[in-house]
Amino acid sequence: MTTYRAVIVEIQNNEIVSGNIEEIKSLAETSGAQVIQVFSQNLKKLIPSTCIGSGKVQEIKEFVKNNDIETVIFDMELSPSQESNLEDEIKANIVDRTGLIIEIFAQRARTKEGKIQVDLAQLSYLLSRLKGKGIDMSRLGGGIGTRGPGEMKLEADRRTIKDKIAKLKQELKLIEKNRDLHRKYREKKNIPQIAIAGYTNAGKSTLLNLLTSSDAFVEDKLFATLDPTTRRIKLSTGKQAIITDTVGFIQRLPHHLVDAFKSTFEEIKEADLILHVIDISTTEFNHHTNVVKEVLKELGAEHIPVIYVYNKIDAVEIPKETFLRYPKQRPFIMMSALKGLGQEELLKKIEESLSSFWEKLTLKIGHVDSWILSFLLSNGYIISQDEKEDYTVIEVELPVSVAGKLKKSLKPGQLL
Ligand SMILES: Nc1nc2c(ncn2[C@@H]2O[C@H](COP(=O)(O)OP(=O)(O)OP(=O)(O)O)[C@@H](O)[C@H]2O)c(=O)[nH]1
Ligand SMILES: [Mg+2]
């Protein structure tokens, strides 16, 4: 990864939300920035042309010149004209929060699907910026209907971008279709789906690795995971489920990204259970929890049962009893995905939560109907089996829909 020298600008103001300084710092570092300085300004009123006041602009300009700074990162949304005004004044790259997050996604996309999604987000972000610039330019031009050469070039750019967006959307559709087929297959097999969701860096991939003994990519940086990873997980009774690790959430997740990553978020929407992973070693964890709950609601996933996984218990100083007194979401468990603490309890909770997925039947099967036995062996989980001379009594758990079908084809007396 190429590194670059950067400064961060944050504003304290009632109108806009400037986030947490630690978070924008780690976003910047994730993108390769070496953060040399942070500038803060308390502003009663935002300045339309440059967002921050002219004195601050000069101060940053000086610093940039004297310290070889390449990029100035603003922890807020800038309008296209603010961005170009600042660029002209400060003479460095200007990046806002959305631009920074999209850049990180671009650096991290690995699979074809991920890359297309990021391209899509970048282009739609660019298109929205061009629109803004176009409006500004026509205002500068004066009269209605005056279209200077710049305006016409913009028009052409816009068309090219729109064409590209349409093409990418088509490609994505094809990939999604394929994924849908996989999902349908899983549904037919009647395997419950579990989605791991949570704020970025909460430990989602670490949890997936723990539960499935695999080695998905884990890193102490934001957005290590972009592409959903799906694995099979065996529960204690031998039952199986499918578990998917997904992209992390963040406050003020750019909507260009949410749109582009729709299919990734679909995985969450279709789940039978969500494990909402929360990093309790950060003081911001309650706020993060609310952000994730909000995004889940926006995705239309608020009806899905959730287990709140309070993770990184090994990294907090507070005793368990103190933590238990904090307000918490329920049902919850406390664990350390890294150290494997609380794994058994989590698996138990998962099974409890998924229990309505299976139905328990007790059957009396005569030897002539041995096909039923083989059907049960391949589709269900045998709890007990009692062989008699002419028949077998068998206790079995089957996915509800499979049980329903089986019951229809049973003879009287076979279901106990
Ligand atoms: N101390 C401690 N660290 C943990 C625990 N779980 C995860 N981590 C660390 O937290 C960092 C992030 O872990 P990941 O599993 O990549 O987190 P993630 O939620 O998948 O992050 P993104 O994919 O970036 O959204 C890594 O450095 C992990 O080693 C834990 O239980 N305790
Ligand atoms: Mg991850």
Image (tube, rainbow, N blue to C red):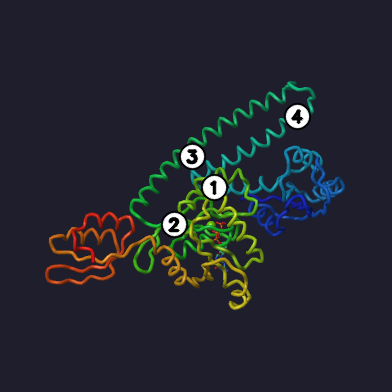
**Nearest to the observer: residue 7 or residue 51:** 51
Q: Are marks 1 and 4 in contact (CB under 8 Å)?
A: no
Check residue 172 in the rendering and tell me which mark sits there, or answer none: 3
Q: Give the side of residue 155 with respect to residue 92, left or right.
A: left
Between disc 3 and disc 1, whose residue precedes? 1
Q: Are marks 1 and 2 in contact (CB under 8 Å)?
A: no
Q: Residue at x 26, y 71 (%)?
A: 384
Type of amino acid under label 4: Met
* Residue denoted by label 4: 137
In this rendering, position of residue 89 left or right of residue 166: right
Mark 1 crowd level (few <14, some 14–19, many ≥20, 10 Å Cα): many
Instruction: Kindly tell me whether mark 4's CB lies below 8 Å from ligand 1.
Output: no
Going by the numbered disc 2, the residue's amino acid type is Asp
In terms of sequence position, does the residue under pointer 3 or pointer 2 come before the other? 3
Q: Earlier in the sequence, mark 1 or mark 4?
A: 1
Q: Callout 2: few (<14), some (14-19), or many (20+) C-alpha neighbours within 10 Å?
A: many
Task: Name the spot of residue 216 as percent of width and height, x first.
Answer: 48, 58
Residue pointed to by mark 1: 109
Q: Along the polypeptide, which appears first: circle 2 or circle 4?
A: 4
